[in-house]
Amino acid sequence: MTIPNQIADLPLLTGIKLTGKVAIVTGGGSGIGKAAAAVLAHAGCRVVIGEYDAVRGTAVANELTAAGFNAIAVQADVSKRADAQRLADAALAQFGSIDILANVAGVYPAALVANMDEREWDRVFGVNTKGVFNCCQAVIPTMMANRRGAIVNIASVDGMQPGIMPGLSGYGNAHYCASKGAVLTFTKSLAAEMAPYNVNVNALSPGWVATETALAGGRFEEGLKQVPLGRGAQPEEIGQMILFLASEAASFMTGTNLVFSGGSVMD
Ligand SMILES: NC(=O)c1ccc[n+]([C@@H]2O[C@H](COP(=O)([O-])OP(=O)(O)OC[C@H]3O[C@@H](n4cnc5c(N)ncnc54)[C@H](O)[C@@H]3O)[C@@H](O)[C@H]2O)c1
């Protein structure tokens, strides 16, 4: 992905401006998170990248800064509450507010339940589910005080419909499916709690997305056979949906799960 040029012409970017908004993007060092950071920066946001891998996070922040955008990177393990707080504190110290939180950080190892390692279960839930809770809890005091905000939690179609046979998306990673299912219900609960404060909380469930990690998983081509539209999404397309959910255009949406799957799961 080229940050400065190719994505500037994305359809939603021509119409949605979030000038001056402060957006935290977890997992912003690669894949969907990197694309989301770039899309939000193009829309006018000041971007805070929360990333476990400091080298990757800094590289994306530097790339955005070199292209003329406002961006910083904070090394943070979202599964740790203290790191999530440090991330929110850094956003406030650098940019003075927090308007948008995109919870993108996630891990998706494959393992059958029969021989799944207990520590892997804990790691998947720690990053994918507790990480979402940690980051939400760290930003909501600011959003509640501001009486505005948008939180977008990246779930997955695997959290809605785990695959029922080998080769299908969600087959052989029950921990991942369960962790994302929990994100979906957490999103609804938090949306109800935040509604009186004008804070919108939504989930976004992608199907197959052509990121390096997903492609390296070895199941991508096989997985596309279950996609009626016959292709995987590009990370920038997910970035655009995050932009939409973070924008005024979606101000009447909360507690929703936006499915973006090429038809692999229809809902
Ligand atoms: N790629 C897909 O097909 C697909 C489909 C549905 C949902 N998703 C979800 O989208 C998200 C991003 O997926 P991706 O394909 O871009 O993956 P990716 O591996 O390219 O990016 C994930 C990023 O999160 C970071 N990260 C991992 N653990 C972290 C932690 N504890 N704290 C902070 N950062 C951490 C990684 O370093 C990495 O930069 C994940 O939540 C994933 O479950 C992906």
Image (cartoon, rainbow, N blue to C red):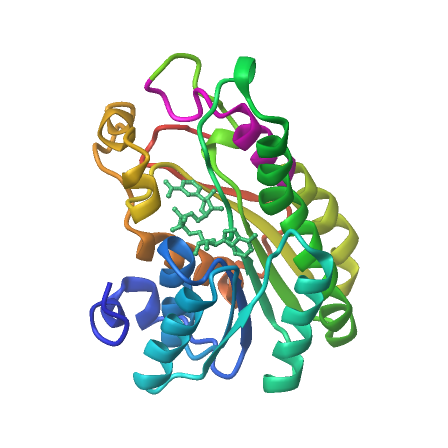
State whether residue 211 appears in this view.
Answer: no
Across and down, in percent, residue 100 comes to 58, 67
The region drawn magenta spans 167-183
Foreground residue among 250 and 229: 229
Residue in the picture at 27% in, 64% down = 10
Across and down, in percent, residue 84 comes to 67, 63
Q: Quadrant of residue 80?
A: bottom right
Residue in the picture at 76% in, 64% down = 197
Q: Is residue 142 left or right of residue 105?
A: right
Foreground residue among 26 and 36: 26
State whether residue 205 appears in this view.
Answer: yes
Across and down, in percent, residue 176 comes to 53, 32
Quarter of the picture containing the N terminus is bottom left
Residue 174 drawn in magenta: yes
Foreground residue among 232 and 191: 232
The image shows residue 238, relative to residue 122, as above or below, that is: below
Residue 207 drawn in magenta: no
